[in-house]
Amino acid sequence: MIEFRQVTKRYDSDHTALRQVNFQLNRGELAFLTGHSGAGKSTLLKLVMVMERPSAGEVVVGGQLLNRLPKRQIPYIRRHIGVVFQNHQLLFDRTVFDNVAMPLEVMGASPDDIGRRVRAALDKVGLLNKEKMNPMQLSGGEQQRVGIARAVVNKPPVLLADEPTGNLDPALSADIMHLFTQFSQVGVTVLIATHDIALINSMGRRTLTLEQGRLVAGGNPIVPGGGHGH
Amino acid sequence: MATDRRPTGESRRAPQKGANQARSPMKAQARSYLDHHRKVARDAALRLWKTPVASVMTWAVMGVALALPMALLLLLGSLQGVSAGWESSARITAYLAMDHSREQAAELASMVGEDGRVLSVELIDRDQALAEFRASSGLADALDFLEVNPLPHTLLITPEDSARTASGVQGLVSYIEGLDGVERVQVDLGWLQRLNAMTDILARAVWALAILLGAAVILVIGNTVRLAIENRRDEILVAKLVGGTDAFVRRPFLYTGAWFGLGGGLVACLLIQMALWWLSGPIERLAGLYRSEFALQGPGVDGAFALIIIAMVLGWLGAWLAVRRHLDDIEPGEVAGG
């Protein structure tokens, strides 16, 4: 579902964010992406979302080579990628329902369709009774779940999460991880960028480790628990 | 949850427009597209409504900028109506050669009268002319000293409506000048041409002003929409993140521009109507003193409608420029943290 082939991202002459990164995530796979700040986690996620283009190498998402994708095609790619942010990026000028409905609205879904699918997504994250509230009235964990509902409402085949549990206590983190596991079980490819080593260890999943732009572990899916790539 | 998993893996994997269309019939797609437009238009209008002071101020600026050239155009139209009225009084005087007899003159008169461009011909024979001159000039005694009548037969020609333009009259004059026995043709076209030239200059000046003020309207709306874009930065970011196309992101702002235009157009119509009402009394009195039928013409329903449409197009254009200029600056690149 997601494939990086010898991907290098150079921002300018003296800053290389990613160096020759190779990996492949299959359909329904759940993996972690970890590394120190500045190791290139965000850059990697941005390349998947076509917020950035690689300087060299190839990025393939859902069988589509993103390198030379025309700019006007980018929105259509993003409709197939759900994203959960640490700061959730919710809009406080509208209800929970309207926040979750946004990915469906940009696709031009009908109001009936939107209503049904938004409620299904909110039900999934356990917030069905809060659809009319403003996200401001919700707790941090609830806000994060609204963000997750928005990311999955249009059933994207790929789900990216950037520090999704960054501000949450361990119990809430476990809840959210449980949700992600469920999505992967129905075939969604989930990639979670996080610092939280304890969380990663508790899950026992494949872990891609970046160090100064190099993928130093997890590049090979056969080795469980993250053997060194080279 | 599982029941509405309609999109298959195949359709998701092909990230094309077609993938979305394949999910529902074209008709439903078109309806939801129209629904979406209606919703966006309503939201944009409601947003303006929620900031009444700012909206009214923008409408007022637009209204003044649009009312000024519109009022001048109306004035110009009224002036051109006046000059057209005067043109209709243009008559051509043809003096015949001295050696033409009364019969020859009458023959010539009926010939000219048959021309399609001529409404009527009046023949003033030389004796009649002398009598009139004697009566009106007060030179009766002096005229008595003359042995012969120095005045020729004269044709007074009134052109047909269709020939009452400056060029039409000119054409008729050259035709009459070419007739056998016509000595001299006189027509008071000079002042008409001068008036026409002046209204031409005025028309150009007014159009130049209209274009400048139209550009000003576009810039005002552009700047207002730029602020609106800044205010809704987060929303634009999220829309782009979840796959909103540029058209989707642009749409609310274009509607905002069009609504600003609608309000501005209405204010302009109101201002023009007020100015008309304010001026019509004195102008009527002045025109009465000159025995002219001059009257200020209002824009009428058509004119008001056209003005509002133009205002909306200008507002839309201003918004489009702002969106084009500023929307690309808002890219979700900075969203994903360090």
Image (spheres, coloured by chain):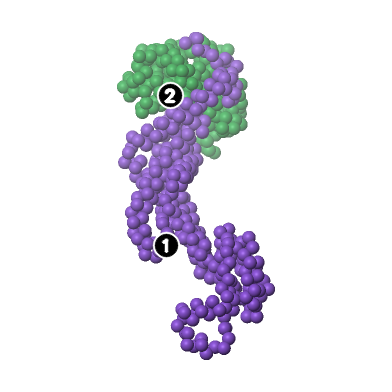
Chain colours: A green, B purple
Viewport quadrant of the C terminus of chain B: top left
At 47% from the left and 26% from the top, the residue drawn is: B35
Question: Total marks drawn?
Answer: 2
At 46% from the left and 50% from the top, the residue drawn is: B214
Q: Is residue B192 above or below residue A209?
A: below
| Residue A10 location, quadrant | top right
How far from the left and from the top, in percent, is residue B179?
A: 67, 71
Residue A85 got which mark? 2
Disc 1/disc 2 C-alpha distance (Å): 76 Å
Observer-nearest of B4 and A167: B4
At 47% from the left and 85% from the top, the residue drawn is: B139
Q: Same chain for marks 1 and 2?
A: no
At 53% from the left and 70% from the top, the residue drawn is: B188
Circle 2 — which element? loop
Badge 1: how crowded within 10 Å, few (<14), some, or many (20+)? Answer: few
Q: Is residue A215 above or below residue A172?
A: below
Observer-nearest of B98 and B28: B98
How far from the left and from the top, in percent, is residue A60?
A: 59, 24
Observer-nearest of A66 and B65: B65
| Residue A23 location, quadrant | top right
Q: Amino acid at mark 1?
A: Ser
Residue B40 got which mark? none
Which chain does tag 1 point to? B
Observer-nearest of A167 and B316: B316
How far from the left and from the top, in percent, is residue A163?
A: 42, 22
How far from the left and from the top, in percent, is residue A5?
A: 61, 24
Q: Is residue B150 above or below residue B171?
A: below
Q: Amino acid at mark 2?
A: Phe
Circle 1 — which element? loop
Q: Which residue is mark 1?
A: B292
Which chain does tag 2 point to? A
